[in-house]
Image: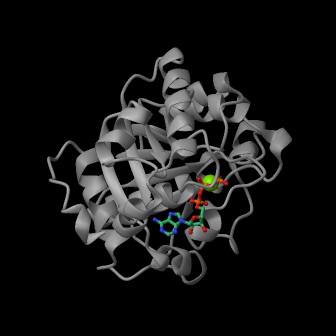
């Protein structure tokens, strides 16, 4: 039975889908079978990030309605062997209920080492549906007060839902910008504001934006290396944080 991890944030646009896609790529590069489940009904983008948008016919809502078997709505990514995607419903009104997610996700997880669920922004119905079947959560935040406040609220909502295993990803970190912006004195203050244990710091890295169009960023780009460390830590390996001055 694979581990089911929801990637969430509360605040929109902080890098949930990017983290889902690149953590999935990093886990698959380690030889794991990984299913990405796009739960951002109406605004899903993982099909584009994983290079399957041209082939997609069915999605999560078709599986739930019975129009397609799960196998028909799961697409192998051409970017990495072992990486698969079930795309999000095209329309927001086709959002899948929490009770259906609690039945479907464990059945899917039997066939994979990891299921990563890309959550929509906010803490409403879409959030609750995406988190309903999660064993654990990765909360993504950028290193600023607005995002960490949303992360802290998300933490509370997850606890109410019984998802107590939570880790923080600080995304889009740039040491020089962080010093100039004076949002926080140091990274410990960011972690304290979110109230969640850190699992990774992902640098600001323009190769990720280029990859959204062209496929894969270079294998040695700083963000790719950071996602590789995140993948190791998700599997319980202890990997030290590199010096933040390098970011
Ligand atoms: N570490 C990074 N460095 C540079 N750009 C990044 C980084 N992480 C994410 N981005 C960019 O930020 C934008 C938003 O990222 P993404 O779509 O992953 O956010 P999201 O949290 O999933 O948004 P939404 O809430 O709308 O689902 C994208 O253009 C993405 O390429
Ligand atoms: Mg997203």
Q: Is residue 47 visible?
A: yes
Q: What residue is rendered at 40% in x and 47% in y?
A: 184
**Vertical arrangement, residue 36 with respect to residue 191, above or below:** below
- Residue 211, how many percent across, how many down? 52, 78
Q: Is residue 146 left or right of residue 30?
A: right
Among the 4 quarters of the image, the one containing residue 127: top right
Question: Residue 157's x, y, as percent?
Answer: 56, 23
Q: Nearer the viewer, residue 30 or 243?
A: 243
User: What's the image's color scheme?
Assistant: one colour
- Could you say which quadrant of the image residue 126 lies in? top right
Residue 62 in the image, given as x and y percentages of width and height: 75, 46
On-image quarter of the C terminus: bottom left
Numbered circles on residues, count: 0
**Relative vertical location of residue 241 with respect to residue 149 in this rendering, above or below:** below
Residue 24 visible? The answer is no
> Is 87 situated above or below 96?
below
Residue placed at 74% from the left, 62% from the top? Answer: 57
- Depth order, front residue of 142/124: 142
Image quadrant, ligand 2: bottom right
Would you say 9 lies left or right of 240 here?
right
Residue 197: give x, y in percent of width and height.
31, 35
Measuring 78% from the left and 45% from the top, which residue is drawn there?
67
Q: Quadrant of the N terminus?
A: top left
Residue at 40% in and 51% down: 170
């Amino acid at each position: 039975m694979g581990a089911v991890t929801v990637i969430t944030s509360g605040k929109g646009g902080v890098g949930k889908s990017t983290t889902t896609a690149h953590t999935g790529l990093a886990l698959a590069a380690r030889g794991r079978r990984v299913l990405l489940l796009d739960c951002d009904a109406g605004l899903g983008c993982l099909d584009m990030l994983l290079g399957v948008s041209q082939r997609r016919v069915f999605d999560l809502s078709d599986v739930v309605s019975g129009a397609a078997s799960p196998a028909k709505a799961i697409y192998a990514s051409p970017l990495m062997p072992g990486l698969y995607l079930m795309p999000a419903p095209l329309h927001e009104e086709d959002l899948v209920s929490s009770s259906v997610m609690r039945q479907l996700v464990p059945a899917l997880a039997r066939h994979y080492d990891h299921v990563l669920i890309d959550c929509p922004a906010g803490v409403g119905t879409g959030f609750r549906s995406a988190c309903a079947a999660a064993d654990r959560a990765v909360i993504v935040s950028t290193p600023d007060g607005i995002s960490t406040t949303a992360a802290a609220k998300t933490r509370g909502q997850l606890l109410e839902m019984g998802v107590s295993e939570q880790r923080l990803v600080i995304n889009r970190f740039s040491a020089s910008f962080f010093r100039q912006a004076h949002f926080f004195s140091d990274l410990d203050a960011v972690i304290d504001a979110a109230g969640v244990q850190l699992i990774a710091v992902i640098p600001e890295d323009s190769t990720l934006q280029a990859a959204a169009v062209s496929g894969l960023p270079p294998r040695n780009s700083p963000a790719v290396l950071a996602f590789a460390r995140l993948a190791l830590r998700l599997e319980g390996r202890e990997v030290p944080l590199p010096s933040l001055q390098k970011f």
